[in-house]
Image (tube, grey):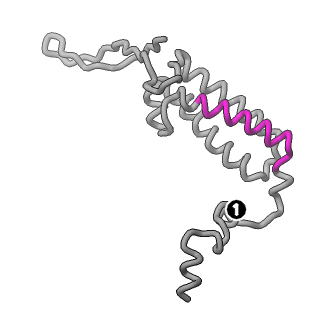
Amino acid sequence: MMSKRLLNVRTITGGVKAWRRCIVTKTSTGIVGLEVDLNGRANLIVQCENILEALKGIPETNGYRQDTEKIVKYRLETAMKFEDEEMIEEEIGQGQLEELLEHGEDELKLIQMYIDEKMWEQVDGQEFTNQEIFLPEADEQPGAQETKKEA
Protein backbone atom coordinates (compact mmCIF):
# COMPACT_ATOMS: atom_id res chain seq x y z
CA MET A 1 0.00 0.00 0.00
CA MET A 2 1.17 3.50 -0.69
CA SER A 3 0.26 6.72 1.04
CA LYS A 4 0.72 9.99 -0.80
CA ARG A 5 1.93 13.01 1.10
CA LEU A 6 2.53 16.53 -0.11
CA LEU A 7 5.87 18.15 0.63
CA ASN A 8 6.74 21.78 0.07
CA VAL A 9 10.03 22.07 -1.79
CA ARG A 10 11.85 25.32 -2.52
CA THR A 11 13.20 25.59 -6.04
CA ILE A 12 15.00 28.31 -7.92
CA THR A 13 13.22 29.33 -11.10
CA GLY A 14 14.90 31.94 -13.24
CA GLY A 15 16.75 33.32 -10.23
CA VAL A 16 13.53 33.54 -8.20
CA LYS A 17 12.90 31.30 -5.26
CA ALA A 18 9.57 29.55 -5.57
CA TRP A 19 7.69 26.95 -3.59
CA ARG A 20 6.17 23.96 -5.29
CA ARG A 21 4.40 20.95 -3.96
CA CYS A 22 5.82 17.50 -4.54
CA ILE A 23 4.18 14.20 -3.77
CA VAL A 24 6.08 12.02 -1.34
CA THR A 25 4.91 8.44 -1.05
CA LYS A 26 5.00 6.49 2.19
CA THR A 27 5.29 2.87 1.23
CA SER A 28 5.92 1.38 4.65
CA THR A 29 5.58 2.18 8.32
CA GLY A 30 8.85 0.41 8.96
CA ILE A 31 7.06 -1.71 11.56
CA VAL A 32 6.55 -5.39 10.77
CA GLY A 33 2.85 -6.19 10.42
CA LEU A 34 1.70 -2.57 10.53
CA GLU A 35 0.29 -1.50 7.18
CA VAL A 36 0.28 2.08 5.92
CA ASP A 37 -3.13 3.71 6.40
CA LEU A 38 -3.95 5.75 3.30
CA ASN A 39 -6.52 7.74 5.28
CA GLY A 40 -4.60 7.98 8.54
CA ARG A 41 -5.63 11.53 9.48
CA ALA A 42 -9.31 11.03 8.68
CA ASN A 43 -9.36 7.69 10.48
CA LEU A 44 -7.67 9.21 13.53
CA ILE A 45 -10.29 11.96 13.69
CA VAL A 46 -13.17 9.46 13.50
CA GLN A 47 -11.54 7.19 16.04
CA CYS A 48 -10.96 10.03 18.52
CA GLU A 49 -14.59 11.02 18.22
CA ASN A 50 -15.61 7.38 18.83
CA ILE A 51 -13.41 7.15 21.92
CA LEU A 52 -14.81 10.38 23.35
CA GLU A 53 -18.33 9.09 22.77
CA ALA A 54 -17.52 5.73 24.40
CA LEU A 55 -16.03 7.47 27.45
CA LYS A 56 -19.46 8.95 28.19
CA GLY A 57 -20.37 5.55 29.66
CA ILE A 58 -17.92 6.19 32.52
CA PRO A 59 -18.70 8.67 35.32
CA GLU A 60 -17.32 12.16 34.67
CA THR A 61 -15.50 12.19 38.01
CA ASN A 62 -13.50 9.05 37.20
CA GLY A 63 -9.77 9.64 36.80
CA TYR A 64 -9.36 7.19 33.92
CA ARG A 65 -12.08 8.99 31.95
CA GLN A 66 -10.61 12.41 32.70
CA ASP A 67 -7.06 11.44 31.72
CA THR A 68 -8.13 9.60 28.58
CA GLU A 69 -10.34 12.51 27.49
CA LYS A 70 -7.41 14.91 27.80
CA ILE A 71 -5.15 12.72 25.66
CA VAL A 72 -7.80 12.01 23.02
CA LYS A 73 -8.98 15.62 22.81
CA TYR A 74 -5.38 16.72 22.26
CA ARG A 75 -4.96 14.17 19.46
CA LEU A 76 -8.26 15.23 17.89
CA GLU A 77 -7.43 18.94 18.06
CA THR A 78 -4.00 18.27 16.54
CA ALA A 79 -5.46 16.18 13.71
CA MET A 80 -8.01 18.91 13.00
CA LYS A 81 -5.38 21.66 13.07
CA PHE A 82 -2.87 20.08 10.69
CA GLU A 83 -3.57 18.42 7.37
CA ASP A 84 -0.05 17.06 6.91
CA GLU A 85 0.20 13.66 8.58
CA GLU A 86 3.88 14.05 9.39
CA MET A 87 3.11 17.30 11.22
CA ILE A 88 0.40 15.53 13.21
CA GLU A 89 2.79 12.74 14.15
CA GLU A 90 5.48 15.22 15.14
CA GLU A 91 3.11 17.37 17.20
CA ILE A 92 1.57 14.42 19.06
CA GLY A 93 4.97 12.79 19.50
CA GLN A 94 3.75 9.25 20.12
CA GLY A 95 4.63 7.49 16.90
CA GLN A 96 3.08 7.20 13.48
CA LEU A 97 -0.62 7.64 12.82
CA GLU A 98 -0.89 3.93 12.21
CA GLU A 99 0.47 3.29 15.71
CA LEU A 100 -1.96 5.81 17.19
CA LEU A 101 -4.80 4.06 15.41
CA GLU A 102 -3.75 0.69 16.85
CA HIS A 103 -3.55 2.26 20.30
CA GLY A 104 -7.02 3.73 19.78
CA GLU A 105 -8.47 0.32 18.90
CA ASP A 106 -7.04 -1.07 22.12
CA GLU A 107 -8.39 1.90 24.07
CA LEU A 108 -11.90 1.30 22.72
CA LYS A 109 -11.73 -2.33 23.88
CA LEU A 110 -10.48 -1.24 27.29
CA ILE A 111 -13.24 1.34 27.64
CA GLN A 112 -15.87 -1.28 26.83
CA MET A 113 -14.38 -3.67 29.40
CA TYR A 114 -14.20 -0.83 31.95
CA ILE A 115 -17.88 -0.08 31.39
CA ASP A 116 -19.00 -3.72 31.35
CA GLU A 117 -17.21 -4.47 34.63
CA LYS A 118 -18.07 -1.09 36.19
CA MET A 119 -14.45 -0.85 37.21
CA TRP A 120 -14.90 2.63 38.67
CA GLU A 121 -16.99 1.05 41.44
CA GLN A 122 -14.02 -1.11 42.42
CA VAL A 123 -11.65 1.85 42.60
CA ASP A 124 -13.62 4.95 43.62
CA GLY A 125 -13.45 5.70 47.31
CA GLN A 126 -10.33 3.60 47.94
CA GLU A 127 -7.27 5.52 48.95
CA PHE A 128 -4.04 4.06 47.69
CA THR A 129 -1.00 5.09 45.72
CA ASN A 130 0.58 3.54 42.68
CA GLN A 131 3.43 2.36 44.91
CA GLU A 132 1.02 0.41 47.07
CA ILE A 133 -0.46 -1.26 44.02
CA PHE A 134 2.61 -2.07 41.98
CA LEU A 135 5.52 -2.42 44.39
CA PRO A 136 5.96 -5.63 46.35
CA GLU A 137 5.99 -5.52 50.13
CA ALA A 138 9.32 -4.56 51.67
CA ASP A 139 9.91 -8.18 52.73
CA GLU A 140 9.50 -9.34 49.13
CA GLN A 141 11.90 -6.83 47.55
CA PRO A 142 15.29 -8.13 46.42
CA GLY A 143 17.91 -7.54 49.09
CA ALA A 144 15.34 -7.09 51.87
CA GLN A 145 16.48 -10.23 53.68
CA GLU A 146 20.13 -9.21 53.47
CA THR A 147 19.30 -5.79 54.95
CA LYS A 148 17.44 -7.38 57.85
CA LYS A 149 20.34 -9.74 58.58
CA GLU A 150 22.80 -6.87 58.66
CA ALA A 151 20.64 -4.85 61.07
Residue 143 spot, x, y in % from top left: 54, 73
Q: Is residue 33 left or right of residue 56?
A: left
Nearer to us in this view, 53 or 103: 103
Amino acid at the residue labelled 1: Ile
Q: Residues within 10 Å of mark 1 (few under 14, many from 20)?
A: few
Q: Which residue is mark 1?
A: 133
Residue at 72% of width from left, 35% of height from top?
A: 52
Residue 14 spot, x, y in % from top left: 14, 10
Residue at 48% of width from left, 35% of height from top?
A: 95
Tag count = 1
In the image, which residues are magenta? 101-119
Looking at the rendered structure, the secondary structure element under dot 1 is: helix
Placement of 148 over or under 80, stated as above or below: below
Residue at 25% of width from left, 20% of height from top?
A: 10
Name the quadrant containing residue 100: top right
Residue 57 spot, x, y in % from top left: 83, 39
- What is the chief secondary structure element of the magenta stretch? helix
